[in-house]
Image (cartoon, helix red, strand yellow):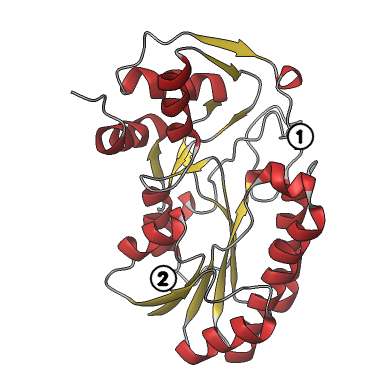
């Protein structure tokens, strides 16, 4: 297949380049191509003439989105609409990377693909709006929601936990925000499988199982040889930030599992990540 990736330089974009190494792959990212520039993104996609576009580009700084919802709308909604229009002009399928934050977090069990989005913060709302546009622009679409993504490259929760543990010697982490830690290489491999099915629709692709931010942090410290670092559990209400995350928003993989696409447990993926990137210095 000919596959074009937006957000080419990001942690998922780089993982996708590895997972799709047997395909004909190209992509774009800032500063060369801005998805909010309709002419530029349309030209970039049309020149490559892909069979499918994986739209991973987004403004994922949830607190930044809360502080500047106008920019969040331009990038995550209008940028997505531009990508959708470009795909519709050349009859390319699109894979849209969405988020668990399209849900409000009031559930008592993991969200299924059929549950209606109801975001409670600007980031989640703009990603839900992007889903809305793609559903109406293209019949051939995969909407893929994921959660708490991290990778060997880039800044993410595991990197930050290790960094702060070494800087401060003690941590305070929320214990009432719950979802699925998801390893970008595992997600990329699942996307590589999904894109060949032709089974368009909504999917939840996350590593199996879920935990709180507090439990995630404890696991990171234990696996990286920092179990001695004390971690104080705190409530979301005690952690001042611009955005309001959904408190309980794990995702259930039911649709992709029916196709035989299942990601390994999050604990196993984290072990691999730690072996590669966060072993203590010798």
Residue at x-position 44% and y-position 53%: 11
Q: Can residue 217 be seen in this view?
A: yes
- Residue 196 numbered mark, or none: 2
Residue 25, position in %: x, y?
37, 76
Residue situated in front as seen by the camera: 148 or 52: 148
Give the quadrant of the C terminus. top left
Residue 153, position in %: x, y?
38, 48
Question: How far is disc 2 from disc 1 in space, using C-alphas?
Answer: 36 Å
Please indicate whether residue 259 sits to the left or right of residue 137 in the image: left
Q: Is residue 114 above or below residue 281?
A: below
Give the quadrant of the N terminus. bottom left
- Residue 281 numbered mark, or none: none
| Badge 2: residue crowd in 10 Å (few <14, some 14–19, many ≥20) | few
Please indicate whether residue 153 sits to the left or right of residue 104 in the image: left
Please indicate whether residue 127 sits to the left or right of residue 254 in the image: right
Residue at x-position 47% and y-position 84%: 50
Q: In this view, does 117 lie above or below 77?
A: above
Look at the numbered disc 2 and give the secondary structure of its residue: loop
Q: Do the residues labelled 2 and 1 touch (CB within 8 Å)?
A: no
Residue topped by disc 1: 244
Q: In which quarter of the image is residue 34?
A: bottom right
| Badge 1: residue crowd in 10 Å (few <14, some 14–19, many ≥20) | many
Task: Answer with mark 2 or mark 1, whichever residue precedes in sequence.
Answer: 2
Please indicate whether residue 30 sits to the left or right of residue 236 in the image: left
Q: Can residue 117 be seen in this view?
A: no
Residue 20, position in %: x, y?
33, 67
Q: Is residue 213 above or below residue 252?
A: above
Residue at x-position 45% and y-position 18%: 218
Label 2 or label 1, whichever lies nearer to me, is 1
Residue situated in front as seen by the camera: 213 or 259: 213
Look at the numbered disc 1 and give the secondary structure of its residue: loop
Q: Residue furthest left?
A: 282
């Amino acid at each position: 297949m000919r596959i074009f990736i937006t957000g080419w330089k990001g942690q998922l974009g780089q993982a996708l380049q590895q997972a799709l190494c047997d395909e004909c792959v190209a992509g774009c990212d800032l500063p060369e191509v801005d998805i909010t520039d309709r002419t530029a993104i349309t030209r970039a996609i049309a020149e490559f003439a892909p069979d499918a576009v994986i739209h991973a580009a987004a403004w994922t700084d949830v607190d930044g989105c809360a502080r500047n919802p106008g920019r969040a709308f331009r990038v995550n909604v209008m940028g997505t609409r531009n990508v959708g229009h470009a795909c519709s002009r050349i009859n390319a399928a699109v894979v849209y990377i969405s988020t668990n934050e399209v849900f409000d977090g009031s559930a008592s069990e993991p969200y299924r693909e059929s549950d209606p989005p109801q975001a409670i913060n600007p980031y989640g709302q703009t990603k839900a709006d992007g889903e809305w546009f793609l559903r109406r622009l293209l019949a051939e679409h995969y909407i893929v929601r994921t959660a708490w993504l991290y990778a060997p490259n880039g800044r993410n929760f595991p990197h930050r936990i290790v960094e702060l543990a070494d800087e401060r010697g003690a941590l305070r982490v929320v214990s009432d925000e719950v979802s699925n830690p998801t390893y970008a290489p595992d997600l990329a491999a699942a996307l590589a499988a999904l894109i060949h099915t032709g089974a368009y629709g909504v999917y939840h692709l996350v590593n199996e199982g879920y935990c709180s931010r507090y439990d995630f942090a404890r696991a990171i410290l234990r696996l990286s040889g920092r179990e001695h670092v004390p971690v104080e559990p705190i409530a979301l209400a005690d952690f001042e930030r611009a955005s309001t995350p959904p408190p309980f928003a794990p995702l259930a993989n039911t649709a992709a599992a029916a196709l035989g696409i299942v990601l390994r447990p999050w604990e196993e993926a984290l072990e691999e990540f730690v072996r590669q990137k966060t072993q203590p210095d010798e």
